């Protein structure tokens, strides 16, 4: 635990920051912000935020921050066959993991990615789905599923031609493989998220005790 007062100044103005505003209006115990660049720490992070109340009056919030590198490690360390790739985007379609980190730092959006073409808005909007695209002479099958706990979407792309499966069974094989991988990676991310929420709830319990 590191104590800092770098955020407690007029220049930072924390009451106008996204994490503070969403905690003030949230009806949930804990919510996540979309990733953002934090100039104080110099990293891209997302915050898990829980509101604090004195009876019915909002008095502030508790936050737990996570560096995007933690998410990237989970997504990018997952090995896929058939030239497969995993990607993660936030609720607005901005990439969090699975592409060049320089593009992530520049808030590269799925709508600017040619490999998704006209399906970008579908991926952002829908809970789950799949589609097929062609690029550079290859046919790619894409599966995606939203992580409802954070409103982020996990995307898996696989090269259809590299599968050692009869053509009539290719879609079935892809679908089963995709579902298994999405479940494994999504579970790992959700476990990490639940741990963050638990830490916030513990902090709130301590603060409520000290306030009594």
Image: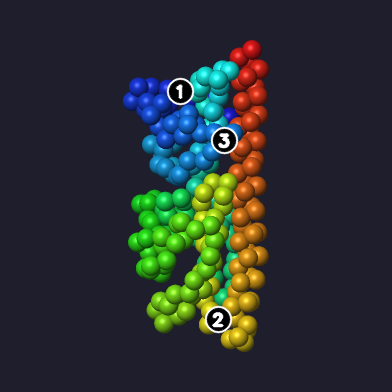
The label number, if any, that marks residue 162 in the structure image: 2
Q: Residue at x 45, y 57 (%)?
A: 124
* Dot 1 or dot 3, earlier in sequence: 1
Q: Tell me if mark 3 has few (under 14), some (14-19) or many (20+) residues whose alpha carbon lies within 10 angstroms of its own.
A: few
Where does the C terminus fall, quadrant-wise?
top right
Q: Is residue 52 left or right of residue 104?
A: right
Q: Nearer the viewer, mark 1 or mark 3?
A: 3
Q: Is residue 106 above or below residue 53?
A: below
Which quadrant does the N terminus fall into? top right
Q: Answer left or right for 189 relative to 137.
A: right
Q: CA distance from mark 3 to mark 2?
A: 44 Å
| Residue 174 x %, y % | 60, 74
Q: Secondary structure at mark 2?
A: helix
Q: Residue at x 62, y 45 (%)?
A: 192
> Real-space Cα distance between discs 2 and 1?
54 Å
Q: CA distance from mark 1 to mark 3?
A: 27 Å
Q: Position of residue 200 (x, y in %)?
A: 60, 32
Q: Which mark is residue 28?
A: 3
Confirm whether residue 103 shows in the render: no
Residue 3 spot, x, y in % from top left: 52, 25
- Which tag is nearer the camera, tag 3 or tag 2? 3
Circle 1 residues within 10 Å: few <14, some 14–19, many ≥20: few
Q: Which mark is residue 5?
A: 1
Q: Position of residue 111 (x, y in %)?
A: 37, 60
Residue 136: image quadrant is bottom left
Q: Which of pointers 3 and 2 lies earlier in the amino acid sequence?
A: 3
Q: Residues within 10 Å of mark 2 (few under 14, many from 20)?
A: few
């Amino acid at each position: 635990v590191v104590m800092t007062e770098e955020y407690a100044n007029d220049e930072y103005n924390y009451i106008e920051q996204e994490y503070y505003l969403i905690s003030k209006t949230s009806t949930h115990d804990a919510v996540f912000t979309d990733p953002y660049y934090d100039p104080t720490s110099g990293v891209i992070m997302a915050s898990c935020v829980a509101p604090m109340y004195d009876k019915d009056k909002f008095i502030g919030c508790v936050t737990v921050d996570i560096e995007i590198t933690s998410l990237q490690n989970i997504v990018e360390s997952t090995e896929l066959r058939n030239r497969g790739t995993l990607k993660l985007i936030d609720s607005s379609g901005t990439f969090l993991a699975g592409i060049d980190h320089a593009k992530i730092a520049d808030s590269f959006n799925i709508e600017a990615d040619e490999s998704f073409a006209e399906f970008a808005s579908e991926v952002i909007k829908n809970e789950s789905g799949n589609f097929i695209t062609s690029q550079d002479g290859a046919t790619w099958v894409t599966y995606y599923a939203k992580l409802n706990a954070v409103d982020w979407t996990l995307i898996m792309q696989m090269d259809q031609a590299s599968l050692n499966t009869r053509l009539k069974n290719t879609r079935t094989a892809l679908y089963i493989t995709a579902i298994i991988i999405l479940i494994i990676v999504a579970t790992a991310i959700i476990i990490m998220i639940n741990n963050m929420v638990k830490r916030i709830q513990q902090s709130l319990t301590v603060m409520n005790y000290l306030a009594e």
